[in-house]
Image (tube, grey):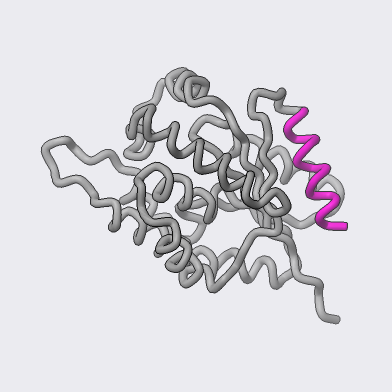
Amino acid sequence: MIKDKGKFYTFEGIDGCGKSTQLVRVAERLRAVGVSCVVTREPGGAPISEKIRELLMAPIPSDKAQMCVETELLLYLAARAQHVSEIIVPAINRGETVLCDRFEQATFAYQGGGRGLDMEKIRSINDFATNGLMPDMTFIIDIPVEISQERLNKLGKGKDRMESAGVDFFERVRKAYINAATADPYGIKLLDGTMSMDELTNEIFEVISCVKA
């Protein structure tokens, strides 16, 4: 018997928005009703992709040459190509539901909106890296940048290279996420990240239940 293909959902938003927490909560609820889930992340998710993640996330000392934005983009998409090929597509083909912490919208928001790279060029390279794979639904959890910064500061850990980009950078990233949701209301669900965790989980689960139906 040929299995139906699985579904692919991605969770997005600026740092500190709560997307990773929601992904885990939604996975637990899906498993509780008998849905087989693969939980993964970007950059990373596959062994080679995790090695690239280490390079992308590591702070670079101020006295060293900084990573240029073109290198950053290509490293993210190289990690994605391996991740899609090794982890995501095989899981979908097995009929499993894939929940991914960040995917293509992160690239459009961070490297496009935040870094100012050309969106059409990003889209073209991303299509090549993913072989045209698109999520069944993307959830963007939106919070103001000041709340993002407060949450990151409360964590008390050193900021990685991306988290150190500054408030103006994250304002541009947030705007890019909102613009993406406005442009594609059927493929992207914009959620209020100031809602309670339970309210967010319920809303996401309800949308997934409709998509799966």
Magenta span includes 210:
yes
| Residue occupying the point 68% across, 35% down | 191
Residue 81: x, y in percent?
A: 47, 67
Q: In which image quadrant can residue 162 be found?
A: top left
Residue 7: x, y in percent?
A: 73, 61
| The one of 70 and 39 positioned closer to us in this rendering | 70
Reply above or below: 116 against 172: below
Instruction: For residue 48, say whether it is visible.
Output: no
Left or right: where 199 falls relative to 164:
right
Reply above or below: 1 against 59: below
Reply above or below: 206 against 82: above
Q: In which image quadrant can residue 195 be found?
A: top right
Number of marks drawn = 0
Residue 117: x, y in percent?
A: 36, 53
Magenta span includes 173:
no
| The one of 129 and 167 positioned closer to us in this rendering | 167
Left or right: where 139 falls relative to 124:
right
| Residue occupying the point 28% across, 57% down | 71
| Residue occupying the point 45% across, 68% down | 124
Q: Which residues are magenta?
A: 199-213
Majority SS type along the magenta span: helix
Reply above or below: 115 against 120: above
Looking at the rendering, in which quadrant would you find the C terminus?
Answer: bottom right
Q: In which image quadrant can residue 140 be found?
A: top right
| The one of 69 and 156 positioned closer to us in this rendering | 69
Residue 30: x, y in percent?
A: 79, 47
Looking at the rendering, in which quadrant would you find the N terminus?
Answer: bottom right
Left or right: where 92 falls relative to 108:
right
Instruction: For residue 15, say whether it is visible.
Output: yes
